[in-house]
Image (cartoon, coloured by chain):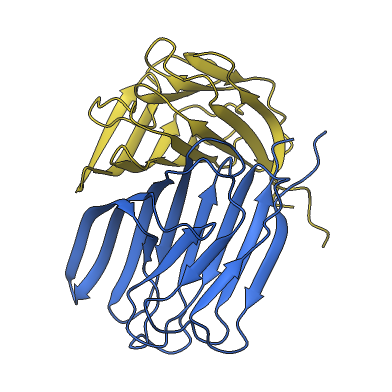
Chain colours: A yellow, B blue
Amino acid sequence: MAAGATYVPIATQTLGSATTTYTFSSIPSTYTDLILVFDGIINSNTICRFNGDSGTNYSENHMYSNNGSASNGSEVSISQIYIGDFINTPMQDGQSNTIMHIQNYANTSTYKSCLWRLNNGTGSKIQVGVGLWSNTAAINSILFGSDATNGMQSGSTITLYGIASA
Amino acid sequence: MSSPTMTLITSQTLASSSSSVTFSSIPQTFNNLIVKTSVRSDANDTSYKWTFNGSSTGYYSRNLYTYVAAPSSYNVGSYSQSNASYLDIDAIVVSVYTGNIFNNAEMYIPNYTSSNYKSFSCESLAENNAGQNPMWVVGGLWQNTAAITSITFTTNGNNFVTNSTFYLYGISNS
């Protein structure tokens, strides 16, 4: 069986100035999964929303390492997924990356789940988490960024890839 | 529409045991790199060393791990490396493990050609079906602005066994 195109770059952006959030819109529904890759600096918590929904329809569960201690946490009925919620410790001390996998994003019958990794090598923080958007709509836009004004720093890059299973 | 990426740049499968493997002359035409290894040590190494461009300075990492020390004795912990001379990736399969078991590790390196410091994400595990079963989640930084042109994997004084594999992929964002 011939494999379909995979790991296809859908859109990419390098920030020319500090920005609060960036939105990927009009995401094609032709892939199976999405992968979002961020590389740069965010000066506060990293957040994500789907389809412009700011209602309390999100939940998340995570574990993390923070300055040598392992811990975990979770949140329910929140208005955005906190990808990097380190007890409100700012991530302003170094280059970081975030890799987020969104599975089966185009179906219209299930709630949408995602897995992420956030890494801040000099900032003593790594986080592994799972998030849920309690909505059956196909994901056609993703807001990603900071919960602080202009929290994403200039020069940061953010790319959205499509993954096809066949 | 953009072209598909995740291109295999190079791979090595060991035909005989070796203490180190290097990917050299990494092309600068991609945006991100993915490294996948499946390795086993011929002795009791619990980790292996990763270095970029032959550099022996500036490696930072944060490690979140779990392993089984004895039946029903589960350990979860965390530690860090600061300005180390190499990146110490744990969860290598050692000689006391069941035969034919190799580790499974993947590292993602965004923007490897940029003039920023290089951040990376890595998972490494060694399911043994007989205790230990280490799993490591690593986030880190190479505090160097040079583009990554080579990656070297080295044991802690022993050898990677025959059939250990090393794969390097390139990802483009356009």
Q: Quadrant of the N terminus of chain A?
A: bottom right
Whole-percent x, y for residue B82 in the image: 29, 49
Please state the horizontal and vertical placement of residue B168, each as a whole percent of the image: 63, 61
Q: Is residue B58 above or below residue A156?
A: below
Instruction: Kindly identify the residue that appears in the image at 52 percent across and 19 percent down.
Output: A154
Viewer-closest of A107 and A26: A26
Q: Is residue B156 above or below residue A50?
A: below
Q: Is residue A93 left or right of residue B56?
A: left
User: Who's the residue at 54% across and 29% down the image?
Assistant: A136
Q: Is residue B111 above or below residue A150?
A: below
User: How many numbered dots are placed on residues in this image?
Assistant: 0
Question: Of all residues shown, which one is farthest toward the top?
Answer: A149
Q: Residue at x 70, y 45 (%)?
A: B30
| Residue in the picture at 54% in, 13% down | A17
Quarter assignment of residue A23: top right
Q: Position of residue A74 (x, y in %)?
A: 27, 35
Q: Nearer the viewer, residue A147 or B84?
A: B84
Judging depth in this view, the residue of A49 and B65 nearest the camera is B65
Pick the residue in front: B71 or A158. Answer: A158
